[in-house]
């Protein structure tokens, strides 16, 4: 093949991986714009891509403005306290925290912290439990019906129960975590735990018979068998479960925040909806895009971690 | 010399959905220390089942296995197994695969340095020094099988069990591996049971060839003593009348006495049901 032809061919494959998604997105944005222009709501036109961009900038500016206000507040406070100490050295300065409105970026951070906490708690329970279920047929038979029944339950059904249970059990005058945080976290855990339990147990139960036999011939003690053979063997399925779970967790969290008015992106959406200003819909649409983008990024990060941790590189590329 | 391994009147019945299936009936075999035994027979006759019972991975329905006059009931490293599909752990390097075995078998008996030397010694024995830090997926099938053998040898087993260790390899690699195995065997003089379906391999490597009848209810058909002097050389043996006579006897057993009465294919349209001929 001639070098020119080869270059053209290379260009062609590059073009395919870059150009095709670009074309896809362009067509999507075009259709979105057309559709948005033809939907008239009581709050104005349905937001088009352009208004999302505008709001993105606005929300970022608002965040910076809010930060400036906070800085100014702390500066004033410091000056005030310094003055009073100068007058009266005995004076113990009061330090108040700024209680401004939470910005869009703050809500994103809150949601991310909550989803990760709920997900990590779920993983800490699901992976050991999944291994135990995968190793024991009896345990599997005993627990499987419970898993199958609770797996399809929507977070909205759990939420009232969780809220009441947390109110009843988590009583402290000076709670380290806000109750709303605990509510969201537990709801996320309850909904995202199942894919991890199921995938881990399936991975453990389906361990290559030869590897199991190697362990038997070596007469590995139970714990060592789990640590050296079972866990590494099940890593690809554990990661499959973790990625499914994290997706569920993120989806569930937004719904839970909306319903329970817990801080986070869900609350942002709800507040904007209640607000009903002309910008509300575009701000909600912005949140939708951001939520989707973060969900995508979370999976991408999990995939990268899987690629580093797992010996089965092929399964990490899916 | 006295018997090291006594396979005593084993029956093996598998419960299946269609009722009990008697795979082995009255398999009886005594093996002396340092002997190299080949188990040969048509595919599906029950060779692996015998090996699995000796390994302790299966429990015989009746009869039993005695090692040094002690009954074996569960698997253990003194009966190391080389599996057909290498069965290396893909997340461990070649070195680590051998290390897992050495650490388990010799913990408290060797120092860290002694273990390291022992692992490297066994890897050298199978000529794999160049690949110690490679993962199994990065080496060829023959190399994987070498590491599998190194792992088994490193356990210093009383009996080495090998289930068609070279069955998945191409002919040239297989010949290399056989020569390596003979070389190792001359040095270590292990007690070995090797399953094979390759007549040349059986004659070349063995002290005795145990020929199994077809299943169900398979058992030991004939035992052939191979008194060819060692070290053996495949090229000189090829012209040796004694070698060829032994070879002919095994072939005669397999293809005349225990001929598989399976039609090749009954209908041409039925392409999925191709019949394996050993
Ligand atoms: N775990 C098992 N359950 C039921 N049948 C089995 C099992 N293992 C082997 N068999 C049957 O026993 C027979 C002998 O199998 P095997 O020992 O694997 O043969 P070989 O190794 O000689 O090819 C076969 O018919 C096989 O289907
Ligand atoms: Mg077999």
Image (cartoon, grey):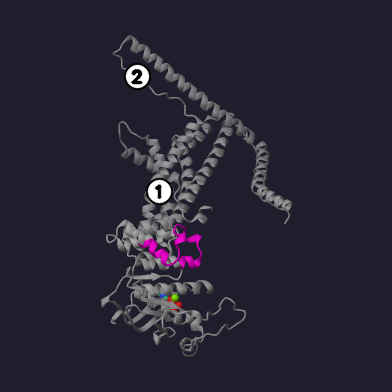
Residue A185 at x, y percent in the picture? 40, 41
Label 1 near ligand 1 (CB < 8 Å): no
Q: Is residue B59 above or below residue B257?
A: above
Q: Is residue A120 above or below residue A96?
A: below
**Horizontal placement of A11 versus A230: left or right?**
right
The magenta segment: B118-145
Snapshot quadrant of residue A89 = top left
Front residue of B108 and A168: B108
At x 53%, y 40%, the residue is: A291
Chain letter of the residue carrying label 1:
A
Q: Are both tags, 1 and 2, on one chain?
A: yes
Front residue of A20 and A9: A9
Q: Earlier in the sequence, mark 1 or mark 2?
A: 2
Q: Secondary structure at mark 1?
A: helix
Residue wearing tag 2: A94
Chain letter of the residue carrying label 2:
A
Residue wearing tag 1: A123
At x 53%, y 73%, the residue is: B172
Residue B199 at x, y percent in the picture? 48, 82
Magenta highlight on residue B130: yes
């Amino acid at each position: 093949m001639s070098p020119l032809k080869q270059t053209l061919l290379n260009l062609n494959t590059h073009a395919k991986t870059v150009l095709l998604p670009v074309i896809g997105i362009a067509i999507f944005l075009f259709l979105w714009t057309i559709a948005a222009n033809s939907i008239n709501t009581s709050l104005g036109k349905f937001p088009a891509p352009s208004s999302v961009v505008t709001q993105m900038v606005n929300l970022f500016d608002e965040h910076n403005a809010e930060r400036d206000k906070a800085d100014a507040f702390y500066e004033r406070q410091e000056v005030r306290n310094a003055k009073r100490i100068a007058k009266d050295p005995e004076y113990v300065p009061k330090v108040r925290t700024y209680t401004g409105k939470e910005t869009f970026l703050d809500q994103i951070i809150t949601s991310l912290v909550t989803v990760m906490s709920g997900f990590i708690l779920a993983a800490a329970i699901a992976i050991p439990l999944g291994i135990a279920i995968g190793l024991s047929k009896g345990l599997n038979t005993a627990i499987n019906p419970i898993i199958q029944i609770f797996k399809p339950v929507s977070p909205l059904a759990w939420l009232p129960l969780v809220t009441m249970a947390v109110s009843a059990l988590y009583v402290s005058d000076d709670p380290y975590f806000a109750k709303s945080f605990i509510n969201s976290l537990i709801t996320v855990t309850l909904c995202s735990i199942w894919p991890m339990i199921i995938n881990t147990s399936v991975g453990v139960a389906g361990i290559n018979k030869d590897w199991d036999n190697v362990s038997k011939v070596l007469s590995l003690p139970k714990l060592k068998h789990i640590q050296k053979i079972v866990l590494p063997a099940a890593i690809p399925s554990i990661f499959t479960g973790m990625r499914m779970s994290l997706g569920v967790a993120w989806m569930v969290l937004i719904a839970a925040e909306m319903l329970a008015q817990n801080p986070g992106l869900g609350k942002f959406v709800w507040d904007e909806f209640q607000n009903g200003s002309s910008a509300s819909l575009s701000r909600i649409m912005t949140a939708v895009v951001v939520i989707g983008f973060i969900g995508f990024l979370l999976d991408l990060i999990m995939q990268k971690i899987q690629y580093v941790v797992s010996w089965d590189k092929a399964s990490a590329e899916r | 010399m006295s018997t090291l391994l006594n396979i005593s009147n084993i029956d093996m019945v598998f419960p299946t959905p269609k009722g009990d299936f008697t795979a082995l009936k009255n398999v009886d075999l005594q093996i002396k220390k340092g002997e190299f035994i080949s188990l040969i027979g048509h595919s599906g006759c029950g060779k692996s089942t015998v090996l699995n019972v000796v390994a302790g991975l299966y429990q015989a329905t009746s009869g039993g296995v005695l090692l040094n006059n002690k009954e074996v009931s569960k698997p253990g490293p003194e009966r190391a197994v080389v599996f057909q599909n290498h069965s290396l752990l893909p997340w461990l390097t070649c070195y680590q695969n051998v290390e897992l075995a050495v650490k388990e078998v010799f913990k408290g008996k060797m120092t860290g340095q002694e273990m390291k030397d022992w692992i490297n010694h066994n890897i050298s024995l199978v000529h794999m020094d160049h690949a110690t830090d490679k993962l199994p997926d990065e080496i060829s099938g023959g190399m994987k099988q070498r590491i599998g053998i190194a792992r088994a040898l490193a356990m210093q087993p009383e009996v080495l069990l090998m289930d068609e260790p070279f069955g998945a390899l191409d002919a040239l690699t297989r010949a290399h591996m056989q020569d390596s195995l003979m070389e190792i065997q001359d040095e270590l003089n292990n007690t070995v049971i090797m399953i094979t379906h390759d007549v040349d391999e059986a004659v070349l490597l063995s002290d005795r060839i145990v020929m199994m009848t077809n299943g169900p209810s398979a058992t030991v058909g004939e035992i052939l003593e191979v008194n060819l002097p060692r070290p053996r050389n495949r090229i000189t043996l090829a012209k040796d009348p004694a070698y060829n006579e032994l070879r002919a006897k095994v072939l005669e057993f397999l293809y005349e006495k225990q001929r598989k009465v399976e039609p090749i294919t009954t209908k041409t349209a039925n392409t999925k049901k191709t019949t394996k001929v050993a």
